[in-house]
Amino acid sequence: MEIISIIYILIFLMLTYAAGVYPKLNFKNRKTFSIIIPYRNENDYIEKNYYFLRKQIYDKNRYELIYVNDHSSDGSENFFNNKINIKKIDLDMGEKGKFEAIKRGFKEAKNEYLILTDCDSYGNEKYINSINQVLNPDDVLYAGFFEIEDSKLLSLDTFFLVGIASALNFFNMPSSCPGANICVKKDIYEKFIKNSETSNNLTEDALLLNTIKKEKMGNIHFIFDENNILKTRGYDSIPDFLNQRLRWLKGGFNLDYRLLIFLGFNFISNLLFLINIEYLFIPFVMIFLFLFCILKRLKRLKYILYYPLYFLLYFMYTIVLGIIFLFRLKNIKWKGRIYKK
């Protein structure tokens, strides 16, 4: 147990170091963007998302909005009937899913960079500029953080997971990135579409990240800027929360053998720490230090007050997810649709 503890401490010290020194870029760019927003039955959020993007402090001639309707039936499909200066696309009957929607939006995009986000997400008026200022010749994919609406506890989890992804990326080990907050060069996404074998992929964002690494298309940059953080709606139920985490786990599981080792070690360590409860202070302290570093950089340090409760949540759901993934996972239900493993 002592050896496991030492390895665990060393891993988290390395991750905390990576998160702490991850570069924050600031270039004087004036790039153009095509923002693609797929939506399916988002009547409660579509207005908020639309006005968030229309009210950006950024030259309106340098970005366009492309909304892609994925067979909505709750009224959101009619929201843009009287709106101007946007492109609205309806998927055909044989098309479904986020990836198909993004591909349709891509065909209409005219600008150099694509911003991919979800219709239930929103942020502040400096969001586009926070992306514009990090663009550089070496990086081709940019990923940002997000938080959960009205839940600091679950927001801690998203900061932790995206923070881990950024730290692993620092060590050139792609894992995942939040599909609701990414920017990618249009020509890179075109190559990715051509290389994709299926549109029924649960985690096209993780696949995109990994494809860029494997094909050596360029580098990936995570954005440490409070102006880039998006809010998104919470989960309808515990199964909804677990299904999303399963979706992310599945997406990263087959991408890199090093990631498989990392996930396996984390799962086994958590089980052993739970069995040998006197060692629980080790993950408690190490995860705290990592989160403290992330939250301080993102100016969300007040969330740390919820850490003790989050630590309990984290330990419970990671063990439950590991068991479900190993013994039961065949299909994943996500946003009303069933996806095969």
Image: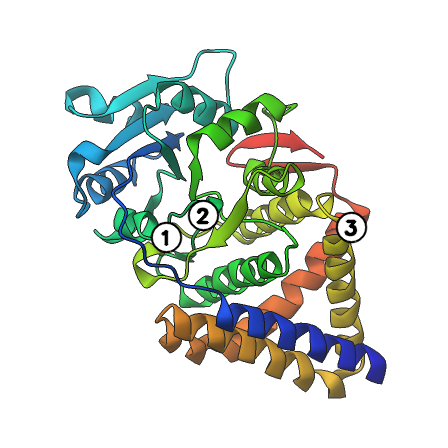
Q: Amino acid at mark 2?
A: Tyr
Residue found at x 25% / y 43%: 30
The amino acid beneath tag 1 is: Val
Q: Earlier in the sequence, mark 1 or mark 2?
A: 1
Secondary structure at badge 2 equals: strand
Task: Name which residue lies at 77% across and 76% down.
Answer: 7
Location of residue 321 with respect to 44 vertically, above or below = below
**Residue at mark 2:** 142
- Identity of the residue drawn at 58% across and 60% down: 170
Q: Would you place residue 278 above or below residue 101 in this image?
A: below
- Across and down, in percent, residue 286 comes to 62, 79
Q: How is the rendered protein coloured?
A: rainbow
Q: Are marks 1 and 2 in contact (CB under 8 Å)?
A: yes
As drawn, the residue found furthest toward the front would be 137
Tell me the crowding category of disc 1: few under 14, some 14 to 19, or many 20 or more residues within 10 angstroms, Cα based.
many
Alpha carbon distance from label 1 to label 2: 8 Å
Q: Secondary structure at mark 1?
A: loop
Residue position for label 1: 134
